[in-house]
Image (tube, rainbow, N blue to C red):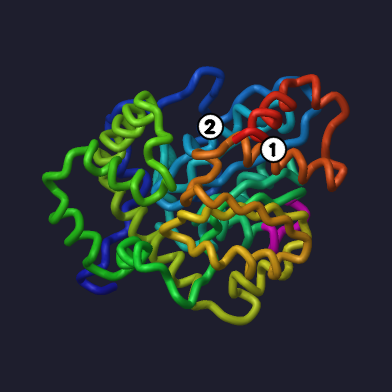
Amino acid sequence: MSSTELPSVPASTVLPKVAPVRVAEGERLRSVGLPGITLTVRSRPPAREGLPAALYVHGLGGSSQNWSELMQRLEGVVDGEAIDLPGFGDSPPPDDGDYSVTGHARAVIRYLDAAGRGPVHVFGNSLGGAVTTRVAALRPDLVRTLTLVSPALPEILVQRTAVPTALLALPGVAGFFTRYTREWTAEQRVRGVLGLCYGDPGRVSPEGFRNAVEEMERRLQLPYFWDAMTRSARGVVNAYTLGGQHGLWRQAERVLAPTLLVYGGRDQLVGFRMARKAASAFPDSRLLTLPDAGHVAMMEYPETVARAFVELLGETGGLVDGTASTGVDGAVAESAGS
């Protein structure tokens, strides 16, 4: 290992006392121990019994909280759970320090196998999109449908605004950035993240901004925060370089599940131009483009994404009888006017 490489941080040594993770009204958190990993799982009680299962997987630097808005709007359609990937949110690092796309995919597969809820409707954003693409290709028995919001699939010409994030993968950069930003407040960091990830940061409510600052303050107290970010960023870059059967685009071509692709026109991290390529790569795909959305459309336009998912279920016969009575129609009608 290079002297500039960040050492792996074993999970057993990184359990500091920090502020508790925020849990929105109606949500529940639980911890699930699996071989080599411990995952925090966020869920909402479904509107009624018998709804199909769904799993939400966040992106680089995110957490299960990124899906709270969408989960709430779909609680009458699916029985949803969102996981914190190892080293993110409230999940400790993996025992083996593996933050590669394959390592994260392995964590998702272990959880789904242990939960016995499959096949499930799988949602992925950014890094989570790359991870769930790999899961769907390798374990089609676990995935009923796949919804990808700005998936981090390989791009030859990366956007200039995405370069700083990619640079985190280089040895020594994380340490330099940590020193350079030492005096930045949590509020300054959050404004920077929102400016990068949202098409219009003004869509974030004052309460949402306060919650994000609170979460940033909590994360900065975690000794493995930058380790998880750096190694996961490196995992994405490494996945971009893989060819053959392990290449993400080749695996996209192997996905059997009906797939909904969501791309934002103002995305500064994943090129909007990749939308058409993705729609051609996934064999059974539908494409939703949102010109004003950024990198996290499920947070900016949850009603619109919810409506598109419900339409996907309608097309593929996945709607459970009586769904309309749960209030989903209200979310769909609202999104139609957005």
Crowd around label 2: few <14 · some 14–19 · many ≥20 (10 Å): many
Q: Magenta part mainly helix, strand or loop?
A: helix
For the residue marked with disc 2, what is the amino acid? Ser
Mark 1 sits on what residue? 307
**Which quarter of the rendered picture does the N terminus lie within?**
bottom left
The location of residue 247, given as percent across then percent down, is: 59, 74
- Residue on which the image places disc 2: 68
- Looking at the picture, how far across and down is residue 7, in whole percent? 28, 61
Residue positioned 57% across, 51% down in the render? 149
Q: Position of residue 92 (x, y in %)?
A: 40, 43
Using the image as rendered, state which of residue 274 and residue 177 is in the foreground.
274
For the question of whether residue 128 can be seen, the reply is no
Residue 140 within the magenta-colored segment of the rendering: yes
Q: Which mark is residue 104?
A: none
x and y percent of residue 302 in the render?
Answer: 57, 36
Residue 208: quadrant of the picture: top left
Q: What residue do we see at 72% from left, 33% from top?
A: 78
Q: Which sits in the foreground, 12 or 250?
A: 250
- Dot 1 or dot 2: first in sequence order is 2
Magenta-tinted stretch: 136-143
Type of amino acid at the residue the image marks with label 1: Arg
- Residue at the far bottom: name it: 244
Secondary structure of the residue carrying numbered label 1: helix
